[in-house]
Image (spheres, grey):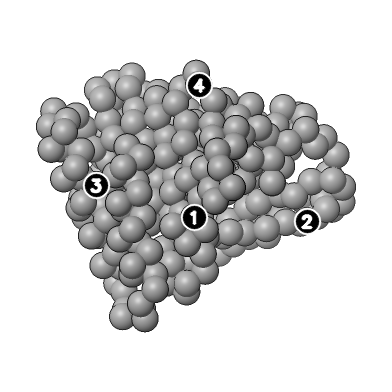
């Protein structure tokens, strides 16, 4: 999986260094898809099927082409977001990556997130911890121990849905976070990298209504293997396939809850 992720990252990096030559749009005008998204997913799909022809595959662009329909079963399944953070990629904002996960019995077993622009590779195998490989070596990941709002860096995202109800929900939740005297808030534009930032202890909490399984499949294993917890934004248990998440250390999990929202 690391080999496939690195080759996919090479494709992303080569395109990243070239002038942007346009893109299409999916469900929303603010939801772009590029030739690189399609090219990378095609490569990953072909590599998976060449080595594991009977396994299932869930990829963001494949699902989009199928009007959003997919089914997650107990069968061996590979989950791919070819370019998580496509808008960042278009603007050459370096927080974009390829995200790959292997799932069995509806549990993520392996997760790989690779950002070629940042030269960071995040990896995890269930029960074996999480690691960051970068220019300075291999580093075991651990979530932060921050427990107070005034010490916390919190990440959230704005997604691509500009429906008035969604905007109102995001602003209301943001106001609640700020009124709790939170130290700072960030938006990187990539769910997978947001999860990795919590896993490495750089950020203390990430919440969002809207991500899909391909956005978070790899990152959820990376962050939980680093000691983090993954919940619904309401504070309820998280189930693979849910469209809302709250990810943090155990201390912060006791403090945050947001009203239910249907993405």
Q: Nearer the viewer, mark 2 or mark 1?
A: 1
Q: Confirm or deny contact between disc 1 and disc 4 (CB under 8 A).
A: no
Real-space CA distance between mark 2 and mark 1, rounded to the nearest whole angstrom: 25 Å
User: Quick one: SS at disc 1?
Assistant: loop
Q: On screen, 221 above or below 169?
A: above
Judging by the rendered image, the residue that carries numbered circle 4 is: 128
Label 4 environment density (alpha carbons within 10 Å; few <14, some 14–19, many ≥20): few
Q: Is residue 158 visible?
A: yes
Q: Nearer the viewer, mark 4 or mark 3?
A: 4
- Which quarter of the image is occupied by the N terminus? top left
The spot of residue 72 in percent (x, y) is: 30, 31
Judging by the rendered image, the residue that carries numbered circle 2 is: 184
Q: Nearer the viewer, mark 4 or mark 2?
A: 4
Judging by the rendered image, the residue that carries numbered circle 3 is: 44
Real-space CA distance between mark 4 and mark 2, rounded to the nearest whole angstrom: 32 Å
Q: Nearer the viewer, residue 114 or 73?
A: 114
Q: Earlier in the sequence, mark 1 or mark 4?
A: 1
Q: Earlier in the sequence, mark 4 or mark 2?
A: 4
Q: Nearer the viewer, mark 3 or mark 2?
A: 3
Real-space CA distance between mark 3 and mark 1, rounded to the nearest whole angstrom: 19 Å
Quadrant for residue 24, please give it. Answer: bottom left
Judging by the rendered image, the residue that carries numbered circle 1 is: 119
Q: On screen, 93 above or below 145?
A: below
Real-space CA distance between mark 3 and mark 2, rounded to the nearest whole angstrom: 37 Å
Label 2 environment density (alpha carbons within 10 Å; few <14, some 14–19, many ≥20): some
């Amino acid at each position: 999986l690391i080999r496939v992720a690195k080759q996919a990252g090479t494709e992303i990096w080569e395109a990243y260094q070239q002038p942007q030559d346009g893109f299409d749009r999916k469900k929303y005008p603010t939801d772009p898809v590029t030739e690189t998204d399609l090219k990378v997913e095609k490569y990953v799909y072909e590599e998976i099927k060449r080595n594991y022809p009977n396994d299932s595959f869930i990829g963001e662009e494949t699902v989009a082409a199928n009007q959003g329909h997919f089914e997650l079963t107990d069968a061996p399944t590979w989950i791919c977001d070819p370019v998580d953070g496509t808008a960042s990629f278009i603007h050459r904002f370096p927080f974009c990556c390829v995200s790959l996960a292997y799932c069995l019995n509806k549990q993520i077993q392996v997760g790989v997130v690779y950002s070629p622009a940042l030269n960071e590779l995040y990896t995890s195998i269930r029960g074996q911890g999480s690691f960051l490989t970068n220019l300075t070596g291999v580093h075991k990941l651990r979530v932060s121990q921050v427990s107070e709002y005034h010490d916390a860096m919190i990440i959230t995202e704005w997604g691509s849905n500009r429906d008035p109800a969604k905007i109102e929900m995001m602003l209301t939740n943001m106001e609640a976070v700020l009124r709790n005297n939170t130290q700072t808030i960030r938006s990187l534009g990539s769910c997978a990298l947001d999860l990795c930032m919590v896993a490495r202890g750089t950020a203390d909490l990430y919440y969002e209504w809207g991500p899909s399984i391909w956005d978070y499949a790899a990152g959820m294993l990376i962050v939980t293997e680093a000691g983090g917890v993954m919940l619904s934004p309401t504070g309820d248990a998280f189930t693979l396939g849910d469209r809302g998440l709250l990810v943090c250390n155990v201390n912060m999990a006791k403090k945050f809850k947001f009203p239910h929202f249907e993405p």
